[in-house]
Image (spheres, helix red, strand yellow):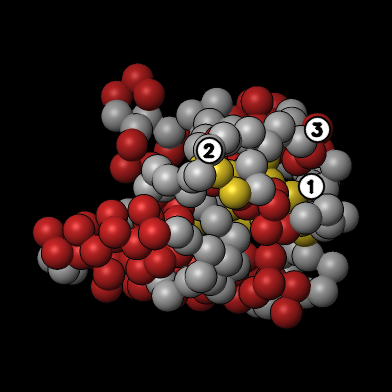
Amino acid sequence: MVTRLTGSGAGATGGIDTSTPNVARIYDYILGGKDNFAADRQAARQLLAALPDIAGTVRDNRAFIGRVVRFLAGQAGISQFLDLGAGLPTQDCVHEMAQAIAPDARVVYVDNDPVACSHGQALLGPRDRVGFVLGDLRLPDQILRHPEVLARIDFSRPVGVLCACALRAGRGETSSGHRWVPRPSRTGQLPGYHARHCRGRPGR
């Protein structure tokens, strides 16, 4: 488990810094969630004023994730998911959607933001079939070998890999997408492997 943040002062609540805006909580606010704070809401309103289309992009992205998870858990029979660049597991979260169709589904959320990871772990609490780990999608081997991932994901069976709006950060030598192309040395199997990603483009 990642050590929870130990923020201090008036802006720290339960080990989570509430005084500094956080991308995952801004995303939650735009989706109409409640797991955000005043600093996040102020930053979100400024963002929406500058880029009004961003709200629709965020909602479309979340709807896309929902369609993918329901398809994989239902028609494809996938019961294991890695959600890369997950943000906070709040609005229409992957494990709730997957387990509504496949009650035994296992989900591991991954994010490289320590704040999102700490907050996400606090929201989830201890669960056998759901976890949240700190990890960089540009370093897939580290994620795939993480003890919390291996405790929940059986790579001898099919896995659904989700990556919504995170691949835009990679370019050139650091590009992330090709590193998640399935290879036996990484996933332990190829049949049944599913990968879905989405990149929003405001105004298009």
Using the image as rendered, state which of residue 198 and residue 21 is in the foreground. Answer: 21
Q: Mark 2 falls on what kind of element?
A: loop
Please give the label number shown on residue 153. 1
Vertically, is 173 above or below 137?
A: above
Label 3 crowd bin: few (<14), some (14–19), many (20+), radius 10 Å: few
Q: Amino acid at mark 2?
A: Gly
Q: Position of residue 154 (x, y in %)?
A: 82, 46
Residue at x 38%, y 47% (from the top left corner): 21
| Residue 142 quadrant | top right
Residue at x 68%, y 58% (from the top left corner): 123
The answer to whether the residue labelled 3 contacts the one labelled 1, judged by CB atoms less than 8 Å apart, is: no
Q: Is residue 102 visible?
A: yes
What residue does disc 3 label?
147
Q: Mark 1 falls on what kind of element?
A: loop
Please give the label number shown on residue 6. none
Residue at the top extreme? 173
Where does the N terminus fall, quadrant-wise?
A: top right
Please give the label number shown on residue 9. 2
Where does the C terminus fall, quadrant-wise?
A: bottom left
